Amino acid sequence: MKLNDFEQDGVMVLEPKGKIMGGPDATILHEKLYELIEKGKKKFVIDLSRVEWMNSTGLGIIISGLTTLRNNQGELKLANVTEKIKSLLVITKLATVFETYDTVDEAIKSF
């Protein structure tokens, strides 16, 4: 997995590419999220348009990030959720936990 990040209108946008699964790849997203939270960033959008697949470990990382942010008066939203990942969110009943948006811009404007 590769990960790009940038800030737009005070919102951190994370763009993972590939598969979000266990192992060293998973730690890339986890470490970046927590590094930015420690720097005081509170608004995040994860752009899932280039994520091929996510397993339970990947979901756990995103849930952990969401929980940490909410405990620190922050928020994490998802954008460009693919059909595969959308079905995973529905199956795991997480579709009601995460705010999802069709585009990164829509997600950013929602803050």
Image (cartoon, rainbow, N blue to C red):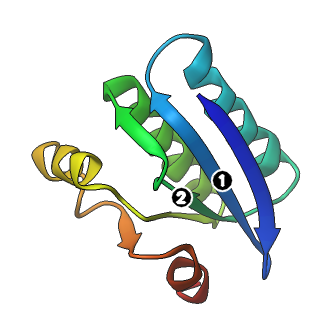
Callout 2, which amino acid? Answer: Asp
| Residue under the image location 51 percent in, 52 percent down | 66
Tell me which numbered mark, 2 or 1, is placed earlier along the sequence: 1
Picture layout, residue 8 above or below residue 94: below
Q: Position of residue 97 (x, y in %)?
A: 30, 60
- Quadrant of the frame with the N terminus: top right
- Residue 78 point in image, percent of width and height: 45, 62
Q: Are marks 2 and 1 in contact (CB under 8 Å)?
A: yes
Residue name at image x 73 percent, y 47 percent: 4
Q: Amino acid at mark 1?
A: Leu
| Alpha-carbon span between mark 2 and mark 1 | 6 Å
**Mark 1 neighbour density, 10 Å: few (under 14) some (14–19) many (20 or more):** many
On screen, residue 3 versus residue 105, left or right, reads: right
Residue marked by disc 2: 47
User: Mark 1 = which residue?
Assistant: 14
Say which of 59 and 1 sits in front: 1
Task: Give the residue at x 40% y 24%.
Answer: 57
Residue under the image location 28 percent in, 47 percent down: 85
